């Protein structure tokens, strides 16, 4: 495959429930995760659901970071997609998992680009 980008899809379980429901905190975590990975932040949009849950996106020059949180389950699904060879999406994904205090964290990295997709198995961290 002629890789254009790397896409980390992660499942976070047994997270800090209060953090999963705090839109402002999640927004700060995601912006910091993007910056820690070396990305350039362009736009930020997050939404708080009633009675609980947060969804959001950080648009970066190199692509995006997203989250959907489910505090009632202690669960969050995240995506970190970066184009190019400089930014490592794993750095951002690990920072997010640590910040949300995930006790269980599984991820898969999908190469994106021109050619057939080859996905490695989930990695439990």
Image (cartoon, rainbow, N blue to C red):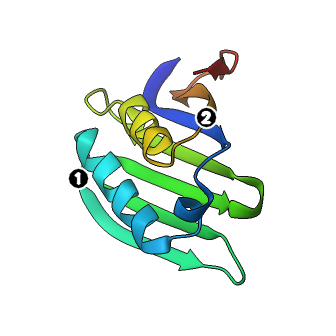
Residue under the point 76% across and 62% down? 72
Residue position marked by numbered label 1 in the rendering: 40
Q: Is residue 38 above or below residue 112?
A: below
- Relative to 5, residue 44 above or below: below
Compared to residue 77, the image places residue 112 above or below, namely above
Image position, residue 73 (x, y; %): 77, 55
Q: Is residue 12 visible?
A: yes
Q: Position of residue 81 (x, y in %)?
A: 47, 42
User: Viewer-proximal residue, 109 or 118?
Assistant: 109
Residue located at (38% from left, 70% from top): 44
Q: Percent position (x, y) of residue 124?
A: 64, 20
Counting residues from the start of the chain, the first of labels 1 and 2 encountered is 1
| Viewer-closest of 63 and 18 | 18
Q: CA distance from mark 1 to mark 2?
A: 29 Å
The C terminus - image quarter: top right
Q: Nearer the viewer, residue 6 or 69?
A: 69
Q: Is residue 3 left or right of residue 31?
A: right
Residue furthest bottom in the image: 50
Identity of the residue drawn at 61% across and 32% down: 105
Q: Element at badge 2? A: loop
The percent coordinates of residue 24 (x first, y second) are 41, 73
**Observer able to see residue 61:** no
- The numbered disc on residue 23 is none
Q: Is residue 123 left or right of residue 60?
A: right
Q: Residue 103 got which mark?
A: 2
Quick one: SS at disc 1?
loop
- Pair 1/2: label in front: 2
């Amino acid at each position: 495959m002629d890789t254009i980008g790397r896409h980390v899809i992660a499942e976070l379980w047994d997270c800090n429930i209060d953090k999963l429901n705090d839109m402002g905190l999640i927004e700060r975590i995601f912006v910091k995760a993007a910056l820690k990975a070396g990305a350039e932040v362009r736009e930020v949009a997050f939404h708080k659901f009633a009675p609980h849950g947060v969804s959001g996106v950080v648009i970066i020059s190199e692509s995006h970071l997203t989250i959907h949180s489910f505090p009632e389950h202690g669960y969050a699904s995240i995506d970190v997609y970066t184009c190019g060879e400089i930014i490592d999406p794993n750095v951002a994904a690990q920072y997010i998992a640590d910040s949300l205090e995930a006790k269980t964290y599984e991820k898969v990295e999908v190469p994106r680009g021109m050619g057939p997709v080859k996905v490695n198995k989930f990695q439990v961290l």
